[in-house]
Image (cartoon, grey):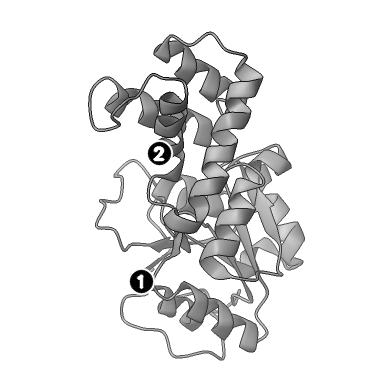
Amino acid sequence: MTDRAHPIVAIGFDFDHTLGLDHGLEATAFAELAADLGKPISLADAPWSSIVPALLARFRGGELSVEDAVALFTRELGDDGDPVDRAQQWREHCYALVPKHVTPVDGARAVLDALRAAGVPIAILTNGWSPLQEKKIAQALGDFPEPILISEVLGVSKPDAAAFAKLVDALRVPSHAIAYVGDNPKTDVAGAQGAGLTGVWFDWEGISYPTDTPPAQIVIHALADVSALVPGRAAETENLVS
């Protein structure tokens, strides 16, 4: 149940694995870059099955820039080309893969339409880089006129409280009146709660909640349940727990 002393009036969303799926787009772009360079790889085979996910995790966590991640990848390939040129090649592969790789999560467009119809302020706060994230959002969700906040542009990544402060500014309501919906317990839920927002864990992929992470204030199993968080919408369902 939500805290009635502080009703939720606005909703922030994560994007990847919350509103949209890219089905390994960035990893596939690495494989395509390797093929371009005459050094084909299989993402399913060692060492690439470990190298590529590790590079992407460091990149998504804000530890590496695009240029740094691609430079490390091409070094592993044994390629000595210009890292700036290689990074741009990788970006172009990412853009080209968007139409066939990116799909909405079940119920994403419907819940956004319902919130808009109810006059609920919404926004997306996502880790990633621009303009790939905008292209993915447009592919998955169509027109999204509300604020889209991307970590590369902000200069700060979730779970840093400063990233969530940017979301609060964009939604123009107090932090305690915002629910942030995401699939990642640490980056999304704990990050939001640490910044004074209500953390909503979208538990739909069968992962275990980490025992070293503060429990989510609210748990949902379908995006349709988001509407129940806002007073005046449908009654809260049994799987919204505190």
SS for dot 2:
helix
Q: Is residue 12 above or below residue 208?
A: below
For residue 241, the mark is 1
For residue 28, the mark is 2
**In the displayed structure, does residue 106 sit left or right of residue 42?**
right
The tally of labels here is 2
The answer to whether any part of residue 53 appears in the image is yes
Please tell me which residue is depicted at 43% across the width and 54% down the height of the picture: 101
SS for dot 1:
loop
For residue 130, the mark is none
Please tell me whether mark 1 or mark 2 is closer to you in this view: 2
Q: Is residue 141 above or below residue 89?
A: below
Q: Looking at the picture, which amino acid does disc 2 mark?
A: Thr
Which one is in front, 113 or 173? 113
**In the displayed structure, does residue 7 sit left or right of residue 22?**
right
Quadrant (top left, top right, bottom left, bottom right) of the N terminus: bottom left
Q: Looking at the picture, which amino acid does disc 1 mark?
A: Val
The answer to which quarter of the image holds residue 235 is bottom left
Local packing at callout 2 (Cα closer than 10 Å; few below 14, some 14-19, many 20+) is: some
